[in-house]
Amino acid sequence: MEESIEKTKESIKEETKDQDGGKTEDHEDSQKIKVPDPSMHEEPEEKIQTLETADGTSGEEQSIIEGAWADVLGSGQLKKKTIKKGTPNTRPVTSEICTIKISGELADGTVVDVKDKFSFQLGDLEVIQGIDLIVALMDCGEISQIEVAPRFAYGSLGNGKDIPPDATILYTIELLEISKEEDLELVNIDERLRIGNAKRERGNWWYSRGDFTSSIQCYRRALDYLDTENETETDSPDKLQEILDDRLKVYNNMAAAQMKIEAYDAALKSVDNVLRCQKDNVKAIYRKSKIVTAMGKMNEGIALLERALHLDPSNKIVQQDLMRLQAKQKLEVQKEKSLYKKMFNLNSTPAPKTSQGKPKVKLTVPWTLMIGAVTAVVASYVTYRFKLF
């Protein structure tokens, strides 16, 4: 029995040797496990499944460990290479505070975005999207390199400083620490002011880049911190007023972003939240006029602009918009009058003139009036003739 097994093994070896032409692979990278590149021909599934290490890790995991590039999104626009493994099973989750050491490099070797200890809240758009996505895939203590294409970095605008438009950036990131988000009820008012305003400024940054959806997300998170419902007896009235003022700024900015994506109902609620506390807030009144006008309420929009101009007579923007809206209203009124004339055939035409140059008067009797008169005469005759009454 054992002899037959041995013979079978030897025959299998000989067949394998014949298929390979008696040659064995002797390439220096033959022992390395590569991550498949989506842009190239992929290996058959059966072959990939056999690429397992002695400790049971998959080929893809081993490739990252050995320093090969992994195409995270499958589009080539976001790649990750692990330099040093971190503590297993310690990846951060959304809303946790991540502290990283980071350094970026442009294609020409320029070093950018260097921070030895930078903290941000994962998933809150406090960093570029590429970093937000990659850090969520890192374990605590891990060091990785990431290649971020412009779409997930600073796009076609750059950062206005040292990063030009359409720049691909190579980052080296070390995930130093992960901590839970503190319960808002336990955060003191000074810290809430700091965090809330930082998120508001980040929303302004996204707004300036034309990413209005991301700016709205940041503004909503800012409102979570700039809330006076968690006030304590030790909070001073000045601090409470400060946090209220900053909260109203967020509502005003969020309304502007919501208008950009034509979410007019949501924008109207945002400005109403401002006017509920500050009824003479010119910026909120002005934005509300634009919202209601976009919703088809032109008369209300004009009334709001007139009110804003009364509060701030020197405001050139309000003056220009009011004049433009009044001119538009006048034009629409004229169009309506013209339409009514066409509907009822009231267009005035020049009267024909006689040979002496005097206007020729032409009397016309409407058919309905003539029929009514004839009917009345007939009815009177019938009543008299047959003495019906």
Image (tube, rainbow, N blue to C red):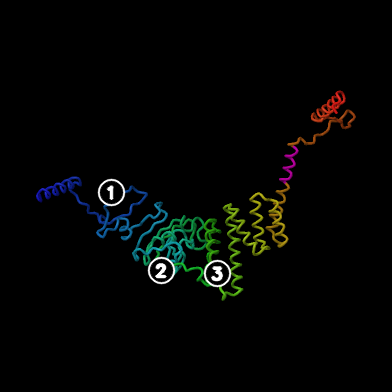
User: What secondary structure is found at the residue carrying circle 3?
Assistant: helix
User: What secondary structure is found at the residue carrying circle 2?
Assistant: strand
As drawn, the label of residue 46 is 1
Q: Residue at 31% of width from left, 55% of height from top? A: 34
Q: Mark 3 or mark 1: name the one nearer the start of the chain.
A: 1
Q: Quadrant of the C terminus?
A: top right
Q: Amino acid at mark 3?
A: Asn
Q: Are marks 1 and 2 in contact (CB under 8 Å)?
A: no
As drawn, the label of residue 177 is 2
In this view, the mark in front (3 or 1): 3
Using residue 326 as the reference point, say whether residue 32 is left or right of it.
left
Q: Which residues are magenta?
A: 331-341
Density class for disc 3 (Cα within 10 Å; few <14, some 14-19, many ≥20) is some
In percent of width and height, residue 54 lies at 24, 59
Q: Label 3, label 1: how many angstroms apart (C-alpha)?
A: 58 Å
Q: Are marks 3 and 1 in contact (CB under 8 Å)?
A: no
**Residue 189 sits inside the magenta stretch:** no
Q: Label 2, label 3: how many angstroms apart (C-alpha)?
A: 28 Å
Using residue 41 as the reference point, say whether residue 298 is left or right of it.
right
Density class for disc 2 (Cα within 10 Å; few <14, some 14-19, many ≥20) is some
Q: Amino acid at mark 1?
A: Glu
As drawn, the label of residue 176 is none
Q: Mark 1 or mark 2: name the one nearer the start of the chain.
A: 1
Quarter assignment of residue 244: bottom right
Residue wearing tag 3:
230
In percent of width and height, residue 272 lies at 63, 59
Q: Amino acid at mark 2?
A: Glu
Judging depth in this view, the residue of 336 and 19 nearest the camera is 336
